Structure formats: structure tokens, C-alpha cells
């Protein structure tokens, strides 16, 4: 079963929970370009099978703990950015671009190595009254996939977990229902992220990229950048925080998730490219054993004169790892890039240009 926004059931994402694992009642956004897998709880039971005096088959089992995984796929710019920011685990900063009036630039950076606790939020889904509630939600991983095939719209999938239940004096019960029926932020004017409006550049170095310098209408890497946009058949960016849902159920929680501590993140970037050694020779890059920087830029329509909707993803330090031939299509080559930290201990930096004046995960 899937829940699709704008049909019978609606899906709301709250503002950041002021107290982790305590449900928020204020909706930050209603997902309007999303599908959501029905959050089935993972029940952890203890059986008396093979215990003394319980016969050959055992007499039953007792529920000990449970946690509710979920998966959300969306396509609209700020819906993707909101969930990406929760996966990064840190509040985005908002600035007005020089000369702008309605446009705002959001800077999104992953948590630094010393910080392990992730922000939590609440999901409500239903018809606006009697909604099902999942509190203490965290985003563990995402995958952003773009392809020139078909209409080219992004496949952005975010996986996480939370509590659809709570512990009441040692008894596990379903969360009380919620009543989110409207959201503070409206992203409906924003475009869907599309491969047809996306460009990719590779450069020798990252340079000095910051919120006020990102153009959203051209390359922002140093002058040595190479434009791969017309060579890319498909690309996928993935990130995981290496969190395990069952391991978030710990002492003091009464049988539900009660900690939001991440592991060490991993990021990979994969591309399938038309081969053109005159533009980029991947085999030579592998042999040279040198690192590069990558910029992935989605461009949208105007917010106001001179300022367009956009999403700009920077990978300051990557290394080409594998580049096997595509046996089915010998004019193409698959390239896997490993993402590393640069000298500033950064491995990804993301900027969006939208009309939203508040942070994506503001409380």
C-alpha cells in the first residue's frame, strides 16, 4: 500500500521537534509531489519456544519493542531539500542574495564529525483529522537519481524510522491521532527537479564557493571546470548515516526508539557517460590518481528578474574509482566516484534558491 499526496491521504512533515521523540503539532510542509510507503512497525518479540515446560511448539510470545521504518519519494525542489537537510542533520542558514527581494538562498551542510545527534521531526498522514502520527522521525539515507530517459524527473528517495507507538506505563500502544490539515510553507509554485534542466561540471579544485557567490545559472567551480552535461546518461548520488533502526530502541525508552545518534556517513556518486575522451578521459584520471571537485546544478524558472529557482550540489573532493565499459552500449561508460573530505573537513555542500524565508528544519 502506498500513500499518495493529493489523493485520499495527505502527508505532513512537522517542524523540528523541540523535544526529540515528542510529537510536534505544527506542520512545516505538506508533501505534494511524494509517495510514501505505508509505515509498518517492526515488531520485536520474545518467544517461549524451546523453553522448559512449553511443549514442542511453545505457548506464545511477548512483544518487547517496536520501531516504524518509512520511505518517502519526492520530486519538488524544496520537498527534496527539506528531507535532505534532515539527513544532513544540521539547520540550514538563509540569506538574501545581493540585489534580490523575494529570492532566498539556503545553505545546507552535513553535521561535523564531532556531532552525532540527529534532529527529529513528526510525520502525520491521513485526511486532516484523525491522522496517524509517527514521532521521533530521522532520515538515515537518501538516493537522488536522474536519467535522460523518459520525462527526466528526479527519483529522490529518503529512508528513515520513527515511533508510530509509545510506551504507556510499560504497555506499548498506538500514538494518539493528530490533526495537521495545513502547512506553514507552500512549495506548489516550485518546479520538479528534472534531468533536462540539470548540468554537471568537474573541476581540478573546489575554489571559494559560498552562499553569496552561487549563481544557480552557470558553473561556480574554478575556471578549470569541464562541462559533462551533454555526456551524462544518468547519475545517482547516495548518502547514508549508517543508523540501524533496531539499535535506536534502547534503555529508558520503554520499547520504542529513544536515541537519534548517527554513525559515520558514506557518500557515493555514480554517472553513466557517453564516452568522449576529448572532453574527459576517465581512464587517464584513474591512472593519474588525482582528486577532482563536482558541481551538480538544477535550474528552474524565475523567482524574480535575475534570480531563478535552483538546487546546487557541490562535492569538494572526489576520486574516480571504477569505470567499466557498458557492454550493452559500448559508446557509454559507467563511472563510480568516491567522496572524501577536503582540507576543511567538508564532503558535501548544498545550496537552494527559493522563496522560503525560514529554514527548512526550523523549530
Image (spheres, helix red, strand yellow):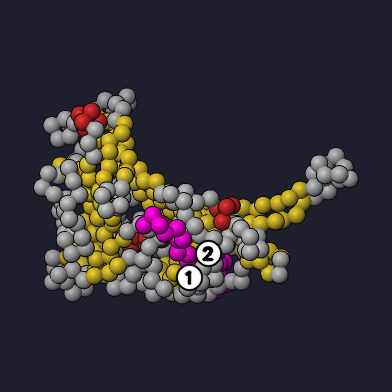
Q: x, y (%) of residue 183?
A: 41, 73
Q: Quadrant of the C terminus?
A: bottom left
Rounded to the nearest angstrom, the CA distance separating label 2 from label 1 is 8 Å
SS type, badge 1: loop
Name which residue lies at 51% across and 60% down.
260
Please provide the residue range marked out in magenta: 112-136
Decide if residue 224 is in sight here. Answer: yes
Q: Viewer-proximal residue, 345 or 188?
A: 345
Mark closer to the chain start, 2 or 1: 1
Q: Viewer-proximal residue, 94 or 274?
A: 94
Name which residue lies at 39% across and 46% down.
266
Say if the magenta span includes residue 120: yes
Name which residue lies at 38% across and 71% down.
362
Q: x, y (%) of residue 128?
A: 51, 72
SS type, badge 2: strand
Answer with left or right where residue 103 lies relative to residue 345: left
Answer with left or right where residue 341 lies relative to residue 197: right
Q: Which mark is residue 261?
A: none
Which residue lies under the disc numbered 2?
A: 136
Q: Are marks 2 and 1 in contact (CB under 8 Å)?
A: yes
Compared to 309, does 18 lie above or below? below
Total labels drawn: 2
Answer with left or right where residue 345 lies relative to residue 157: left
Q: x, y (%) of residue 283?
A: 23, 28
Residue that sits furthest to the left in the current view: 223
Which residue lies under the disc numbered 1?
A: 17
Name which residue lies at 22% across and 49% down.
295
Q: Residues within 10 Å of mark 1 (few under 14, many from 20)?
A: many
Say if the magenta span includes residue 273: no
Q: Residues within 10 Å of mark 2 (few under 14, many from 20)?
A: many
Quarter where residue 310 is shown: bottom left
Decide if residue 196 is in sight here. Answer: no
Amino acid at each position: 500500500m502506498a500513500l499518495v499526496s493529493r489523493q485520499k491521504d495527505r502527508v505532513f512533515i512537522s517542524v523540528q521537534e523541540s523535544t526529540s521523540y515528542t510529537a510536534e503539532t505544527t506542520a512545516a510542509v505538506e508533501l505534494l509531489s511524494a509517495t510514501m510507503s505505508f509505515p509498518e512497525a517492526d515488531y520485536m518479540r520474545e518467544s517461549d519456544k524451546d523453553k522448559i515446560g512449553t511443549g514442542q511448539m511453545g505457548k506464545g510470545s511477548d512483544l518487547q519493542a517496536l520501531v516504524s521504518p518509512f520511505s518517502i519519494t519526492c520530486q519538488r525542489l524544496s520537498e527534496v531539500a527539506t528531507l535532505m537537510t534532515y539527513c544532513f542533520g544540521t539547520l540550514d542558514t538563509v540569506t538574501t542574495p545581493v540585489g534580490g527581494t523575494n529570492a532566498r538562498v539556503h545553505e545546507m551542510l552535513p553535521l561535523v564529525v564531532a556531532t552525532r545527534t540527529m534532529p527529529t521531526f513528526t510525520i502525520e498522514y491521513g485526511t486532516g483529522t484523525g491522522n496517524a502520527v509517527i514521532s521521533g522521525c530521522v532520515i538515515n539515507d537518501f538516493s537522488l537519481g536522474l536519467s535522460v530517459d523518459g520525462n527526466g524527473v528526479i527519483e529522490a528517495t529518503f529512508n528513515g524510522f520513527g515511533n508510530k507507538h509509545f510506551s504507556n506505563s510499560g504497555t506499548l500502544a498506538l500514538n494518539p491521532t493528530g490533526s495537521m490539515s495545513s502547512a506553514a510553507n507552500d512549495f506548489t509554485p516550485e518546479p520538479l527537479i528534472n534531468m533536462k534542466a540539470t548540468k554537471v561540471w568537474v573541476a581540478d579544485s573546489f575554489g571559494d564557493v559560498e552562499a553569496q557567490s552561487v549563481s544557480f545559472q552557470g558553473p561556480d567551480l574554478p575556471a578549470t571546470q569541464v562541462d559533462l552535461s551533454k555526456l551524462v546518461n544518468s547519475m545517482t548520488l547516495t548518502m547514508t548515516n549508517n543508523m540501524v533502526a533496531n539499535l535506536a530502541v534502547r534503555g529508558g525508552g520503554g520499547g520504542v526508539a529513544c536515541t537519534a545518534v548517527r554513525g559515520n556517513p558514506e557518500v557515493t556518486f555514480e554517472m553513466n557517460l557517453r564516452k568522449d575522451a576529448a572532453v574527459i578521459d576517465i581512464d587517464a584520471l584513474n591512472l593519474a590518481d588525482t582528486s577532482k571537485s563536482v558541481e551538480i546544478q538544477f535550474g528552474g524558472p524565475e523567482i524574480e528578474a535575475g534570480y531563478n529557482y535552483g538546487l546546487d550540489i557541490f562535492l569538494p573532493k572526489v576520486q574516480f574509482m571504477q569505470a567499466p565499459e557498458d557492454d550493452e552500449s559500448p559508446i557509454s561508460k559507467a563511472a563510480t566516484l568516491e567522496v572524501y573530505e577536503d582540507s576543511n573537513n567538508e564532503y558535501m555542500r548544498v545550496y537552494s534558491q527559493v522563496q522560503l524565508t525560514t529554514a527548512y528544519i526550523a523549530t
